Image (cartoon, grey):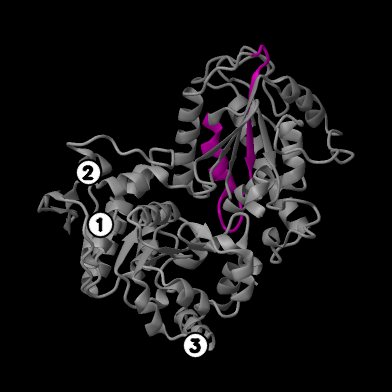
Amino acid sequence: MLNTLQTNAGYLEQVKRQRGDPQTQLEAMELYLARSGLQVEDLDQLNIIHVTGTKGKGSTCAFTECILRSYGLKTGFFSSPHLVQVRERIRINGQPISPELFTKYFWRLYHRLEETKVDLAVVEVGIGGAYDCTNIIRKPVVCGVSSLGIDHTSLLGDTVEKIAWQKGGIFKQGVPAFTVLQPEGPLAVLRDRAQQISCPLYLCPTLEALEEGGPPLALGLDGEHQRSNAALALQLAHCWLQRQDHHGAGEVKASRPGLLWQLPLAPVFQPTSHMRLGLRNTEWLGRTQVLRRGPLTWYLDGAHTPSSVQACVRWFRQALQGRERPSGSGPEVRVLLFNATGDRDPAALLKLLQPCQFDYAVFCPNLTEVSSTGNADQQNFTVTLDQVLLRCLEHQQHWNHLDEEQASPDLWSAPSPEPAGPTSLLLAPHPPHTCSASSLVFSCISHALQWISQGRDPVFQPPTPPKGLLTHPVAHSGASVLHEAAAIHVLVTGSLHLVGGVLKLLEPALSQ
């Protein structure tokens, strides 16, 4: 059943057709809860931290959960979607529940909650906030809003202000809420929403403010944008500990009274050793994740909005600048593996990826294999193979068009020292990139990875490649380049589900 919700595309299409009262979704969720033997009031006992946002809400939840687990607390964590297995959505003490327990309690998950008696639950909103099914939570301990941006416009609205109104729907009377610095418009919407229901809303100080007078905070998740998520997580954890009268919440260094954009600043406190440990040990699959495998380095990030793709590009380019140069004489090759789904604008996302100067751009649907038999966790029953392949061909056309624009001479670009075009190859060790990337479409993730890795990934060793994998001229010539390359840097982005499928193949242990 959860596989029919693996992407939001089907639900969004249904909403666009019906345009009914979104409040009915929450009422339906209460009915489902009652049918399972629970009442909404029972959720009040879970000491919930409820988090929404457009970008970084999952990472914020991961930081928060790991911080509080570092205090010896027993944690529950609900998130969506899953990357590799459905069980990832429900975690106890940082680990997905076992296959046996998931099977046993699929229809009666309240038994799982009674059995574990977690000290707290970190709950990530699915879409929006006001009408998200998680918003049946009535009495969270604390709420958080991560960075806002444009996403799911057909459901949430076509401006950041409209989206902010939806996100502010998780605020509850008398329950503290925290947010990071937002653009003035959406921040004003959040402030007004909070005031209307008497929710105390605070603006998080930067991570730099919390680091003053102490050593820098090390984060388990890479990327400059994770510092904002970590700052929010620290405030959520600190507030939860205080409201639960837990010792060791961290000494307040300064209250810093004052307003920014008419919002009070949250207190600046000294992060405790438990908080530092939690931030350092945080893991969150598929977000600024790096896998090093022989000559291949896989960079995995599920960015799928313009601002998150921009952050992904900064992270990828910084990672390349800090890399060790290969000792071999072959070229260094950069490969993009991309897909985008739903109502997102692939042309806009692909344009943001152009500064990475890829040698090859590869597109494929979010299917690990052409036949998904025995691969239920990755199935998506809401689309057909023809539909997703046509979408990939459209992505390729967008990329080739961007390449043609980039290759066209203009007054502002230096002359290219070698010919450029949609099938040009960079065969020498990297001088400044001036050539356009070759582009290819494969029918599934496995075929794409087979071509990219050329059997050189020591873990990903699939059977003999299918016939026809190298029939395209670019695929044939590119295979030789990849086979001889001293280093291959692969960025996988555009869709969390694509990243999940790649992880399933590159990290078989995740499927156990």
Q: CA distance from mark 2 to mark 1?
A: 12 Å
Pick the residue in front: 334 or 436. 334
Instruction: Quarter of the image for the C terminus: give it.
Output: bottom right
* Closer to the eye: label 1 or 3: 1
Please tell me which of labels 1 and 3 falls first in the chain. Answer: 3
The question of residue 336 being in magenta is answered with yes
Which residue is labeled 3 in the image? 34
Q: Residue at x 60, y 47 (%)?
A: 499
Q: Earlier in the sequence, mark 3 or mark 2?
A: 3
Q: Which mark is residue 210?
A: 2
Looking at the image, is 420 positioned above or below residue 108? above
Q: Nearer the viewer, residue 397 or 313?
A: 313
Labels 3 & 2 near each other (Cβ < 8 A): no
Q: Picture quarter containing residue 223?
A: top left
How far across and down, in percent of the image, does residue 181 sit? 28, 50
Determine the CA span between mark 3 and mark 2. 43 Å
**Residue beneath label 1, please?**
238
Please state the horizontal and vertical placement of residue 280, each as a whole percent of the image: 38, 42
Regarding mark 3 in the picture, which secondary structure is present there? helix
Q: Quadrant of residue 261?
A: bottom left
Q: CA distance from mark 1 to mark 3?
A: 33 Å
Dot 2 or dot 1: first in sequence order is: 2
Q: What's drawn in magenta, residue-wise?
A: 328-355
Relative to residue 89, is residue 451 drawn left or right? right
Which three-letter amino acid code belongs to the residue tagged 1?
A: His
